[in-house]
Image: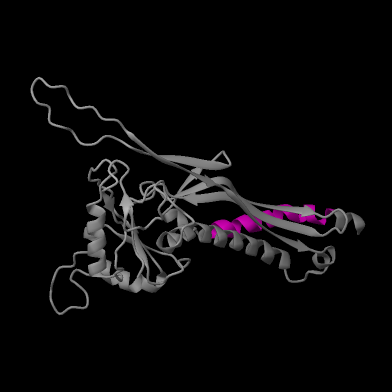
Amino acid sequence: MATLTAQFYELLEADQKQIFFNEFTMQPEIWPSLFESVPSTKAYEDRMRIAGFGTLATKAEGTPIAFDSPVQGTKARTVHSTFGLGWRASMEMMMDDQHGVMSKMSKDLALAAKDHRERLAWSLIDDGFDGNTYTGLEGDTLFEDSHVSIRDPSISQSNILSPPVALGVTGLESMMTLARTTRSDEGRYINLTQSILCIHPDLEHQAYQLLNTEFETDTNNNNVSTVKSSRSGLKPILVPYKSSSTSWSIHAPVGQNSLTWNNRMDVEFDTAGDPVTRDLQSFVFYRASVMFSEWRGNYGSNF
């Protein structure tokens, strides 16, 4: 019996890992539908803000052509964090377990890891409305009514509806206009297609009506809908992790909206035996960070 007890955690290790990873991969996570996952090999990620050239100037005959220089802005650093959770089972509990508790706990550690990763990613969107934890290269949060150009500080732009507007035809029309009249730091109009509508599940049915009805909803007129999905290009993603059930936002596709998941270390699951007590210890951990560099491509309403 002593030999079996000493080796018990080793006999279970492969089985517990399989149970963990089967549960972890069973249901896709939500955050990859909005965030681009990029590998990282350092303790942090740096990014720098640089504006290119202004527009062309008229060259009169016989005069020199105008010259311009790029403008360097601020530098920002995002440091990765390590997240983990452990569970300990006594030797006696493992020996006497009649109900598969170990299998259940491996599954629950997997679910806890998925839940934390979702909360980490979506905390950036929540913070974008009324926090200051995550800032872009200009030092502002994700959604602001005054993003200042580094080429011309007298010019500012907004990517938030102020005052806020509820999800509806009026709100979507205003936000689509904001998105389609956005200019770069150089003053050029940019064409970033907005394809993602980020909402709490409470707004799911309303969003379905808005994006799939040929004519305007809640009206006796037969006005053609201006926000139908075939025109707006929007596809909703439902995020129960959002702290507000009424705020909403639209975004450019993954890889174009600058929302980034820095993947320093994938989720790992491990077990170890305590040489003194013969207890079994199970651990789950990963290392990552989330960030954004550019507000353009993200537009919100904190209704």
Magenta stretch encompasses residue 41? no
Classify residue 105 as left or right of residue 279.
left
- Whether residue 228 is visible: no
- Whether residue 149 is visible: yes
- Residue drawn at (86%, 53%), measured in percent from left and top? 275
- Residue drawn at (26%, 54%), measured in percent from left and top? 179
* Residue 45 in picture, x, y percent from top left: 51, 42
- Residue drawn at (39%, 46%), measured in percent from left and top? 255
Q: Which residue occupies the extreme right position in the image?
A: 2
Q: Which residue occupies the extreme front position in the image?
A: 154
* Residue 140 in picture, x, y percent from top left: 40, 53
Viewer-side residue, 55 vs 261 = 55
Classify residue 27 as left or right of residue 33.
right
- Residue drawn at (47%, 60%), measured in percent from left and top? 122
Range of residues picked out in magenta: 7-26
Viewer-side residue, 270 vs 197 = 197
Magenta stretch encompasses residue 20? yes
Classify residue 155 as left or right of residue 113.
left
* Residue 300 in picture, x, y percent from top left: 34, 61
Against 98, residue 266 (above or below) is: above
Classify residue 282 as left or right of residue 7.
left
Viewer-side residue, 224 vs 74 = 74
The secondary structure that most of the magenta stretch takes on is helix
Q: Quadrant of the N terminus?
A: bottom right
Disc count in the image?
0
* Residue 208 in picture, x, y percent from top left: 31, 69
Against 21, residue 215 (above or below) is: below
Against 204, residue 6 (above or below) is: above
